[in-house]
Image (cartoon, helix red, strand yellow):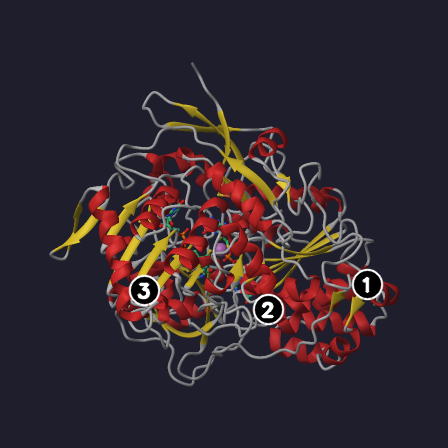
């Protein structure tokens, strides 16, 4: 019998719908599912090939434990016993906060919820955070401050074609969410305009009516410069500002210091281009600003998001149909992963760990004393930096920081210095390879669970195939470890049972899932939160009546531009920025194991301008060394006039000599604790020759 299982892609936050069908080889095949409205059948290469990672030769099929320095096969019983011992030994010797937990935005809601509960209830540790801190934390902080709520997009993607203008800031959607490009094309077919802001002329920038290419790290000045023009050109929507916002006076005062000429000097974007962007944004009746990692992964990402939101508020382009600010969240469950308690300061339902009422509610659901819940812990990079010192044992579930953390060589060294490291993963990632115990877990197509897409749409992924014999689910791992650590109840391995508990824990919180059930998710093909009751239809569009702050008014952010943590100087005269290519995903742990994807994107590269290439004497494909204060990376040159001559770009998907994160700075945003992945200072030279930028040789654009 041919069974077709409708489900969703294991990778990015678009969560494209797909059908899984049995194949002769016993694995599953991926087919188009035209009925799911977000992607209408379209898939990128990663989604199309996702089933390759299910194959036994590619993924882990049994636990591994370190014996005499090498990882060797072991029984589940031994592996779980060793993890429980490693954690309890550390806790006895150094206290509960010596045990750390590092989660991931790819985990389902049920897993993220279970992991947060495991940390707080079983380990009693405050030291839990996750890779989403590296992803959307600045947008989350900016949106919380402005709107009182953080949901990536306050409207469905289907609204994009009907708005008048989209300003896309630091998103390379054509490579990072290819099926969503359709919405941009439809926007333009309908007469709307697209402005793309990116230091590189990306495939996405190619689609734009206007492409602004600022220096990396200057988006804050750019947004404030646009708002300055909005004020001086008389384009402020005074009525909206009065009726629906607070704080304009202070924000306006800060904006007025950002003269167009000053902004041109800081950003490298000419004043006429700035004016054109303002015109495109303000002339139509509705408009949107969408940001992604470009402006967010900066040590001022929160303020930058605040400045883009200011622009929307001052022009009345928020809280109205077809208008608003949105963040294009990244990971498969990047949205849900930040709502249910694996973030260091958070309890389920997007509740604050410091709020006594929130603690009482969640402790009630968990059947524990509210006072037993620890307080907020360290943020992701700070947690990784504390390994081997304050934090001596770590459980990693759903992340590969050896490749993806900033200043990765240091993070790798910290991981090696741990007393005990356990990693639950589907493959032997670079981080798993350092572990004392590796726990092999089931994948998307082998298990059921919910994820929440960038639109705030809660979706059900469904099991289509049985996992290999030696593999268990993350939820089973948590249940087994909890039991061995003395907590027999409260960690069911059945995802629906966990979801039912999550519904109750989230009830009344900002991200309220109380009205969502597995049955509804199947019948309705997704439900938008908040959804407080079974009869509630869900909330595709937020803020149309009021914002989610206490008084219903949105808040302006009084922010001013400041420099990046590290600006180019005589010794390190070039900006480095980092990001993605279409055929690899994140640390590459999964996609570097897929032949078709490796053929398309075989390894790292350094993208640089022909003038810079000529000056250091490298030709296309020749090795380039990139050196920062943290370290060095080497990769072949990819020469293109599409990048600013003062900037080089590296994708971060690979380990080894071409690891981009050898170079990146761990400078953190003071509010969101987001690392500055998108800008640091480097020197570039032809590898092996020792030539290159001479001290004092600052690149002029
Ligand atoms: N193929 C693929 N798709 C993915 C992923 C993947 O790894 N591979 N990961 C998923 C995840 S988790 C995420 S977070 C998203 C990320 O999605 P995006 O944010 O679209 O991806 P990035 O390539 O990190 O960055 C986007 C753009 O920011 C630009 N940029 C660099 N510095 C600056 C700056 O200072 N200002 C501005 N305005 N722009 C700048 C870069 O040139 C780049 O083109 O993608 C998701 N989709
Ligand atoms: N230089 C630079 N660095 C960056 C970025 C950048 O733009 N530039 N972007 C940052 C961003 S936005 C992100 S999101 C991070 C991502 O960085 P990582 O956290 O390293 O992301 P992944 O490679 O997705 O790692 C997920 C790991 O979990 C495993 N896995 C997948 N599903 C499951 C599951 O269900 N259970 C378990 N237990 N494991 C699973 C995968 O095999 C993989 O090993 O990288 C950040 N690092
Ligand atoms: S765009 Fe994202 S969700 Fe869609 S197929 Fe590609 S990786 Fe999967
Ligand atoms: Mo991300």
Crowding near pointer 3: few (<14 within 10 Å), some, many (20+)? many
Q: Residue furthest left?
A: 68
Which of labels 3 and 2 is toward the front?
Answer: 2
Location of mark 2 (residue): 302
Which of labels 1 and 3 is toward the front?
Answer: 1
Locate the C terminus by quadrant: bottom right
Nearer-the-camera pick, 24 or 354: 354
**First in sequence: mark 1 vs mark 3:** 1
Location of mark 3 (residue): 634
Q: Kindly indicate the quadrant of the structure image that contains residue 271.
A: bottom right
**First in sequence: mark 1 vs mark 2:** 1
Crowding near pointer 2: few (<14 within 10 Å), some, many (20+)? many
Mark 1 element type: helix
Location of mark 1 (residue): 244
Where in the figure is residue 283, as x and y percent of width and height? 82, 58
Disc marking residue 224: none
Per the model, the C-alpha gap separating discs 3 and 2 is 32 Å
Where in the figure is residue 356, as x and y percent of width and height? 58, 65
Q: Residue furthest right?
A: 239
Whether tag 1 and tag 2 are in contact, CB under 8 A, the answer is: no
Nearer-the-camera pick, 149 or 676: 149
Instruction: Classify 222 as above or below 697.
Output: above
Per the model, the C-alpha gap separating discs 1 and 2 is 22 Å
């Amino acid at each position: 019998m041919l069974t077709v299982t409708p489900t969703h892609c294991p990778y990015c936050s678009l969560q494209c719908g797909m059908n899984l069908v049995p194949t002769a080889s016993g694995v599953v095949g991926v087919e188009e599912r035209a009925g799911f409205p977000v992607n209408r059948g379209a898939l990128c290469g990663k989604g199309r090939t996702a089933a390759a990672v299910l194959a036994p030769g590619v993924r882990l099929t049994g636990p591994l434990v370190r014996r005499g320095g090498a990882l060797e096969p072991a029984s589940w019983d031994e592996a779980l016993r060793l993890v429980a011992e490693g954690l309890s030994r550390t806790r006895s010797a150094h206290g509960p906060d010596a045990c750390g937990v590092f989660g991931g935005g790819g985990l389902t809601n049920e897993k993220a919820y279970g992991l947060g509960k495991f940390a707080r209830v079983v380990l009693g540790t405050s030291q839990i955070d996750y890779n989403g801190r590296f992803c959307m934390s600045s947008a989350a902080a900016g949106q919380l401050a402005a709107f009182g709520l953080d949901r990536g997009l306050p409207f469905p993607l289907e609204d994009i074609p009907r708005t008048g203008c989209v300003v896309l800031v630091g998103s390379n959607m054509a490579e990072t969410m290819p099926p969503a490009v359709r919405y941009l094309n439809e926007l333009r077919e309908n007469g709307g305009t697209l402005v793309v802001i990116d230091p590189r002329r990306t495939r996405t920038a190619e689609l734009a009516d206007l492409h602004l290419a600022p220096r990396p790290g200057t988006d804050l000045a750019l947004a404030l410069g646009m708002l300055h023009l909005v004020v001086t050109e008389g384009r402020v929507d005074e009525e909206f500002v009065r009726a629906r916002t607070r704080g304009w006076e202070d924000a306006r005062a800060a904006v007025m210091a950002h003269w167009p000429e000053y902004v041109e000097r800081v950003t490298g974007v000419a004043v006429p281009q700035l004016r054109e962007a303002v015109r495109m944004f303000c002339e139509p009746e509705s408009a949107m600003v969408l940001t992604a990692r470009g402006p967010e992964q900066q040590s001022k990402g929160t303020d930058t998001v605040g400045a883009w939101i200011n622009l929307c508020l001052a022009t009345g382009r928020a809280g109205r149909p077809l208008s608003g600010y949105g963040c294009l969240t990244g990971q498969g469950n990047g949205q849900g992963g930040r709502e249910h308690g694996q973030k260091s300061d958070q309890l389920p339902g997007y509740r604050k760990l410091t709020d006594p009422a929130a603690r009482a509610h969640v402790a009630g659901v968990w059947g524990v004393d509210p006072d037993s819940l620890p307080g907020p812990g360290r943020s992701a990079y700070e947690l990784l930096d504390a390994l081997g010192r304050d934090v001596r044992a770590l459980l990693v579930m759903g992340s590969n920081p050896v490749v993806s953390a900033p200043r990765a060589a240091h993070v790798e060294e910290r991981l090696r210095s741990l007393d005990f490291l356990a990693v639950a993963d589907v493959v032997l990632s670079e981080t798993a390879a350092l572990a004392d115990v590796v726990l092999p877990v089931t994948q998307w197509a082998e298990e059921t669970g919910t994820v929440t897409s960038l639109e705030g749409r809660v979706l059900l992924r469904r099991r289509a195939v049985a996992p290999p014999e030696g593999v268990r689910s993350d939820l089973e791992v948590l249940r087994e470890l909890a039991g061995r650590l003395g907590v027999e109840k409260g960690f069911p391995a059945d995802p629906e049972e966990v979801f039912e508990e999550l519904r109750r824990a989230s009830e009344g919180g900002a991200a309220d899932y109380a009205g969502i059930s597995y049955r509804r998710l199947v019948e309705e093909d997704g439900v938008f939160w908040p959804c407080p009751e079974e009869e509630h239809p869900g909330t595709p569009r937020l803020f149309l009546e009021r914002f989610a702050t206490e008084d219903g008014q949105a808040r302006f952010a009084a922010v001013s531009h400041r420099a990046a943590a590290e600006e180019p100087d005589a010794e390190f005269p070039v900006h480095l920025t980092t990001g993605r290519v279409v055929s690899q995903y994140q640390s590459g742990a999964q996609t570097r194991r897929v032949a078709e994807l490796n053929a398309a994107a075989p390894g790292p590269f350094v993208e640089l301008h022909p003038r810079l290439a000529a000056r250091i004497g490298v030709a296309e494909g020749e090795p380039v060394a990139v050196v920062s204060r943290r370290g060095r990376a080497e990769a072949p040159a990819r020469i293109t006039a599409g990048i600013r001559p003062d900037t080089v770009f590296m994708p971060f998907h690979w380990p080894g000599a071409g690891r981009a994160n050898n170079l990146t700075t761990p400078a953190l945003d003071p509010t969101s604790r987001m690392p500055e992945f998108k800008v640091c200072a480097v020197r570039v030279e032809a590898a092996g020759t020792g030539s290159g930028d001479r001290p004092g040789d600052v690149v002029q654009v």
